[in-house]
Every structure is written in C-alpha cells, then in structure tokens.
Image (cartoon, rainbow, N blue to C red):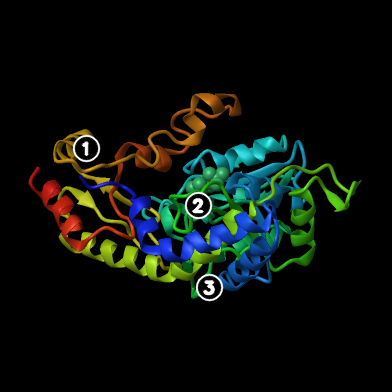
Amino acid sequence: MIKLADLEAQYQEIEAELVPAVTRVLKSGRYILGSEVDAFEQEFAAFCQAKHAVGVNSGTSALHLALLAAGVKAGDEVITVPYTFVATVAAILYIGAKPVFVDIRPDTYTMDADQIASKITPRTKAILPVHLYGQPADMEPILAIAKKHGLPVIEDAAQAHGALYKGKPVGAIGDIGCFSFYPAKNLGACGEGGAVTTNNPAYAQTVRLLRSWGEEKRYFHKYKGFNYRMDNIQGAALRVKLRHLEKWNRARQELARLYGKTLPQDKVIAPVVAPDRTHVYHIYVVRCRIPRDQIRETLNRQGIDSALHYPVPVHLQEAYSDLGYKRGDFPVAEKAAEEVLTLPLHTHMTPEQVKTVAQAVAAI
Ligand SMILES: *Cc1c(COP(=O)(O)O)cnc(C)c1O
C-alpha cells in the first residue's frame, strides 16, 4: 500500500518532542492563545522573513481576516483564480465581495498575470494569487500591476510553506500572506490551524483584533470580530514541527526529482518548476498524456493511492454556479482539471516507493 500522505509516520519521527510539548500545555491550563502561540508566531514570522505572523484557527480564517484587514468590503471585487481549493473563493464571499477570476498558466497552474489588467474595475480592491501545489505564483508582474492600481496583494500560501520566489519565501512577498496548518499541509497542526503573515503592522494589528471578537481589551470591542483564535496546543505542536520543516521540504524535493527521472514522459508530464522559484511539493501533480482513469485504475489495483486536485474548477462547481460563469470561460483551468493526477509523495515515503509508482505507470 502506497499512501498519498502518512501522518502516522510523521508522528513516529517526532513523538519524543511532540508529546512533552503538548503535555506542557495540558498542564498549564492555558488552552486558547497563550505563550506557545506567541512563540510560534515569532518563529513562523522569522521563517517567512515577515515582520509579523498572527496565528488563527484555519487557513480559511486567515484568508477571511487578511481580506478584511486589506479593506475589502461587501460589493468590492477581488481578482483570483478559479483553479484552487474552494476556500480561496469562499473567503471572498464571506465578506459579500465578488470573486473575479483570471485563468492560470498551463505549465505552473498559477495565476496568469497577463490577464489581470483587463479584469480591473473601479470596484477592484485586492489581488489574490494562489501558490498552488507548493510552487509560488509569478509574483513580480502581479505586484507590478497591483502597484500601478494601488491594490494590495494577498498571497494564498496554504500549500507552499517555505517555497521561494527569486530567493524570497512566500508569505511576505505581497502585502499579506495566508497559511493553513491543516494536518496534511507541509506544516500541519494536530487539528486545524492557520496564520496571517505581513510586514505591515496595521494589518497585523487588525488581524490580531479580528481573530478574537475585535476586542481591544476585555469586553471593549473595537471591531465586529470572530472567534478565530489558535489553540495553545496547536502552537506547541507547530513549534515542534517547524523545526523539521526545511528538512521535510528537502525530502519532498528529493523524491520529486526521482519521480522526474523515473516517470515515463510519454505517459505523464512531470511538474514544471519555473527557474526563478522553488517548489515544496505539497502535492505531486502530473499531467496525463494517456487516459487518466486508466492510470488511476492500474495504480489502484497495485495498492497505490492517487487523487485529483482538482477535478472541477471553482467556476464550474455547483455551489458557485450563482457567480455566473460557464464552461469555456477559463479554458486553461478546465483542461488542467481534466488532465491532472496527484501521485503519492510525502516526507516519509521511500525512494523505492517512488520507483514502484513510476514503474507501475510505465507498465501501462
Ligand atoms: C488548505 C487550503 C486552504 C484552506 O485552509 P484550511 O486550513 O483548510 O481552512 C485555502 N487555500 C488553499 C489553496 C488550500 O490548499
């Protein structure tokens, strides 16, 4: 059996560090926010080369509060991509703002900056690129057009902890970064978690207040806020795991390199990494040149898991049909949704397992 992710194996590796860290919190009686969250925020900000990090209870909450901090209001428009996990788009809708989509690039699956200009209107209030699968979007042209129109750029970095764009880690390249610590992400909590990163002290302070009922001091509410606080246990667990993240990302990159060498190029196209970026392979996604179902069935028969990220772009999802888009609006995203396939890749996978998967594909 070769699984897509293996959190049990990850636990085994760090059990001796993780259990005392969590136990410390259990004994402290301080369960929501607290010293572990404070310390994690410092350490995660340093990791992202950001001045501030604010811990919250999920990546979705991070996106929601980042948009609010950036000043997005009901009726405003936010430019993003339809080819992402639905949370990116849902966070915009939580505010009553309107997601305005631009297509992705066929090679990196990230925002096509050339399509942004034609979508900017007087209502546009932010641009929200997604660093999909673990590779940063092409930030320089996105930042250039944002600057020209005075728009903040919010990075959805939920899949890309530690990925570099022109040598700079994601999260503080744009104005605000949003991270998820869903357990299977490259940096995962023992439950839900997320963070907002920024160099802007005003944004950081707004997010800090909004995550806890907009409270400036006890029972004095400056803003209408939310219950989006991070658990202290998650702060403790994340501090332990952050110490392993660079090594784990390197392990993912090694396995990806091996996949690239061993996968049959006539059947699948390996991920394309732009020369000015690093990819941290939150997931390893190939593009199929032969029928995808045939590959999946063959792998499944041999006990090898696979998945689709994502089978339907957001603009064609039933839940978001009221956004008014139709098939054909974003042809690059639609074609990707038909051709992509996620193969197993996680930090505790062995090179032999990668070869087994590659050989199974080659034998089709
Ligand atoms: C996981 C993810 C989110 C949401 O994070 P949660 O912690 O699950 O709320 C948002 N955007 C992307 C691209 C993601 O992969």
Query: 275 or 255, which lies in front?
Result: 255
Task: Tell me the residue that label 2 is attached to.
Answer: 111
At label 2, the amino acid type is Met
Q: Earlier in the sequence, mark 3 or mark 1?
A: 3
Q: Quadrant of the N terminus?
A: top left
Q: CA distance from mark 2 to mark 1?
A: 28 Å
| Residue 309: x %, y % from top left | 38, 42
Task: Tell me the residue that label 1 is attached to.
Answer: 296
| Residue 38: x %, y % from top left | 68, 64
User: Which residue: 22% across, 60% down?
Assistant: 350
Q: Quadrant of the C terminus?
A: top left
**Mark 3: secondary structure:** strand
Counting labels gives 3
Q: CA distance from mark 2 to mark 3?
A: 18 Å
Dot 3 alpha-carbon crowd within 10 angstroms: few under 14, some 14 to 19, many 20 or more: some
| Residue 77: x %, y % from top left | 69, 42
Q: Which residue is situated farthest in the front direction here?
A: 27
The label shown at residue 334 is none
At label 3, the amino acid type is Lys
Query: 273 or 118, which lies in front?
Result: 273
User: Which residue: 60% across, 44% down?
Assistant: 60
Q: Which residue is situated farthest in the bottom direction here?
A: 167
Give the quadrant of residue 279.
bottom left
User: Which residue: 58% across, 50% down?
Assistant: 193
The label shown at residue 168 is 3
Q: Nearer the viewer, mark 2 or mark 1?
A: 1
| Residue 149: x %, y % from top left | 71, 57
